[in-house]
Amino acid sequence: MTPCILIPHYNHSSQLVPVLEALARFELPCVVVDDGSEASERAAVAALVAERPWVTLVQRPANGGKGAAVKSGLHWCHQQDYSHALQVDADGQHNLDDIPRLLAKAQAQPEAVITGIPEYDESVPRHRYLARYLTHFWVWVETLSLELKDTMCGFRIYPLAATVEVLNGARLGDRMDFDPEILVRLYWHGVPVVQHPTRVIYPEEGRSHFRAFQDNWLISKMHTKLVFGMLWRAPGLLWRRTQRRRHWSRASERGAMWGLKTLLWLYRHGGRWLCKAFLPLLIGYFYLTGREARDASNGFLARVSARRPGHPQLSHPSGHWDSYRHFLNFGRAGLMKLDAWSGQLKLDQAQFPNRQMLIEQLESGQGAMMVTAHFGNIEIFRAAAESRYRKRINVLALTRHAAKFNAILSEINPESQVELIQVDTLGPETAILLQERVEQGELVIIAGDRTSASAYGRVHYADFLGEPAPFSIGPYVLAAVLNCPIYLMLAVPDQAGTPMLHLECLSDGIRGRRAERNEQISQCIERYVGRLEQLVLDHPLHWFNFYDFWLRDERGQVSKDSQ
């Protein structure tokens, strides 16, 4: 990836000075495209560029509009063999502190266009703010999708090869109509769009070149053209939507409650032996009817085989029998959940080498965050904590079924100390509740290997089985808010059938200034991922994420950065 910065400029030399000063720290080459500014402005910009060897000036002979300047700049950057162009306005509207995050997203998904979603303050002219919603509506019509949240923000990173291909294949607008049109056409072209909220201001000394009548007329014409362009593309756009991979929370809950309730009924009326007898049939149904989960399982096991050829637990090559056994292990884990929740699963059924570490933490009177994974069966720990230590376990669940699971828990064991708390959208009330419980010495458990559907982009990309995968930063940010230590807790399967509880401290607490906290969070996630990858490679049939784990977290959604 070889990015550069692209700044379209027209009579903004005074505002350009602080912009260039702020950009210097990123040490990226920059091109300023002057769109036929007045003579005094051209001279001022030339003087600015002459003082900065990392900036190149491209002069257009006459004013053609912002779109014309950006197009000229994109072609120039592509001719100079840059891979990506980061577009920044010259008037200081954009929050340049977000540049590292945009670049990180482009690095993680180089084929995507990364675009800002404006978060305005009171400086935005109200008529401009409201008028944007008309464009939003027409963009949703033109793409037959609600995925593009804002197409008018000029703070974005273009993948140059795909963008220039689109520019060469269609005639795009030269003025304020360019920004929305290029994004719609890139979407039509199949280019992924990653969206990132960013603060946008309208400086008091700023000068807007938006022409109310002329530009609104051009934008209206542009939307008319795009709507007609959508009509013959409609079948392909609709087909693309049916083929698009879904976030795990929308793909993996198919029949989850029905399957668990079926197991519960069998467990009550025939005990464990009846569950075990019917389990292969029940799992066989889910395997045969769950194409998306089945494909994800096969893809995951193929990755394991590629990383560890000749794996003793897999066929060579891995196939449907391995995938079915993968599903079956998940069913057995569900059966163990029932054992744990009914009080039949005891601590002496597991090895616990670092038991003293947990005891010391509990005896300190302070609670802790336990980050686990959908691996093995952590229910053995919950059973241990309930039976031996009588501590309430607060399980944070990224699922809409948390309340239903709590009802089942209460039905199985009214004295259970396990409570599932739905945190797909974590509000102040839940944070206060967790703070109180941590102060009372209780434990908070959350899986670190899934991301929330409502918080796309709150992730750290870490190498996992050979490819960057999104890992949520949420558990670690929450631990920082709760001011508590963070532990990694995993139940490691044993060949003899005796699980082992793996416990290690990831951090005594996330503290310090913002940059220090960010670094600590990254270090925690990297340690977590390293340990998880090691165990997943050793025991691939015991990692239960039956969806495309490597699906880019931000694709087609609003990306929210925790910072």
Image (tube, rainbow, N blue to C red):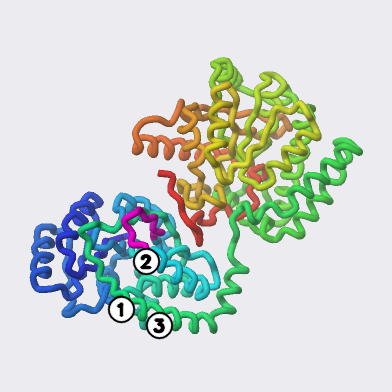
Closest to the camera, between mark 2 and mark 3, is 2
Contact between marks 1 and 2 (CB within 8 A): the answer is no
Residue 121 belongs to the span the image colors magenta: yes
Residue 367, given in percent of the width and then of the height, sits at 55, 24
In the rendered image, the vertical position of residue 121 relative to residue 11, given as above or below: above
Name the image quarter holding residue 260: top right
Residue 317 visible (yes or no): no
Mark with earlier residue (3, 1): 1
Name the image quarter holding residue 500: top right
Residue stretch in magenta = 116-127
Q: Tag on residue 127?
A: 2
Residue 276, given in percent of the width and then of the height, sits at 84, 41
| Type of amino acid at the residue the image marks with label 2 | His
In the rendered image, the vertical position of residue 364 relative to residue 177, given as above or below: above
| Type of amino acid at the residue the image marks with label 3 | Lys
Mark 1 lies on residue: 174
Q: How many marks?
A: 3
Mark 3 lies on residue: 221
Tell me the SS state at disc 3.
helix
